[in-house]
Amino acid sequence: MPPMHRRTARSRRVLVSAAMIAALGLAGCATTAPSAPQAQSGSVSSSGVPWSAQPTPSDGLVLDLPVPASVSSIDFTNQAGQKVTLASLHGKTVVLTDFLTLCQEICPLTSTNFRHMQNTVAQAGQTSDVEFVEITVDPERDTPARLAAYQTLFGAKTNWQFLTASVAQIAATWKAFAVYYAKVAESPSPPQMDWMTGKPLTYDVNHQDVVIVLGPDGHERWLILGTPNTGGAQPPSALVTFLNDEGHKNLAAPSAAGWTTAQVEQGIAYVSGRPLH
């Protein structure tokens, strides 16, 4: 099981919902897909082709789990201050991840891969059909203004949104997706300085690293865990400077178990039923 982000953690864990285990018939979560999709009978991709007829990705986990209505109806706020619900994105393939703008190890690398994938989707003429969504695990600090500054660093386009909500709503969201995170003490002394404000950090957030692809029907259809491998692509310079030692190591020498843009693009193509290349 790939580790979750946290530079001081010694004991690391991943929560997997009982519903997921029951749906997949697995003893635990894995990064290898079953031999066949777990789609419901008659379920089809956005192209109208049954998922059972789609080529199954060789990496990641194929599944079919509805997102609870209580979560899909949450009013998130994006970087522009606009209200967004996951339900409002039904009809699109949604590439979803957890993040925080003050992550020093993983999230800037994940967003670097999202930037590459957004460009791939645009080149395939699917910008209106595929939405990239990063939902914070740090709602206390990740205000729309911070999300907008982060968006600017990456040059994110209209189909790439960064979302926040209340502490309780964020907790409900990631609980529904079985993604673990926890607010913890900031460990370095002296602490790192906020890349945006220049002020010292007072806490960090320990979180699992996962990319989930939702189908146009709003169901979880595919996921992959682990550290992103950017293939040498660099985050924005302000965030490269902000990375700690482990973050620089993740960037320069990614784990062999890390995920690549090619793997997630394969998952996107599988869920949407439309090739990206």
Image (cartoon, rainbow, N blue to C red):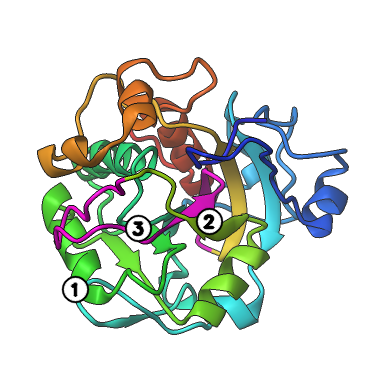
Marked residue nearer the N-terminal end (3 or 1): 3
Q: Nearer the viewer, residue 163 or 244?
A: 244
Residue 188 rendering spot, x and y as whole percentages: 38, 43
Q: Nearer the viewer, residue 65 or 91?
A: 65
Q: Which residue is mark 2?
A: 214
Query: Could you tell which of marks 2 and 3 lies nearer the N-terminus?
Result: 3
Name which residue lies at 36% across and 61% down: 202
Secondary element at image label 2: strand
Camera-side residue: 79 or 22? 79
The answer to which of 101 and 70 lies nearer the viewer is: 101
Q: From the image, state whether disc 3 or disc 1 is nearer to you.
A: 1
Whole-number angstrom distance, CA of label 2 to CA of label 3: 10 Å
Q: Answer above or below: position of 170 versus 259.
A: below
Q: Check residue 211 for magenta coloring.
A: yes
Badge 1 or badge 2: first in the primary sequence: 1
Q: Secondary structure at mark 3?
A: strand
**Looking at the rendered structure, which numbered label has been put on residue 205?**
none
Q: Which mark is residue 131?
A: 3
Q: Residue 140: give x, y in percent of width and height.
A: 39, 74
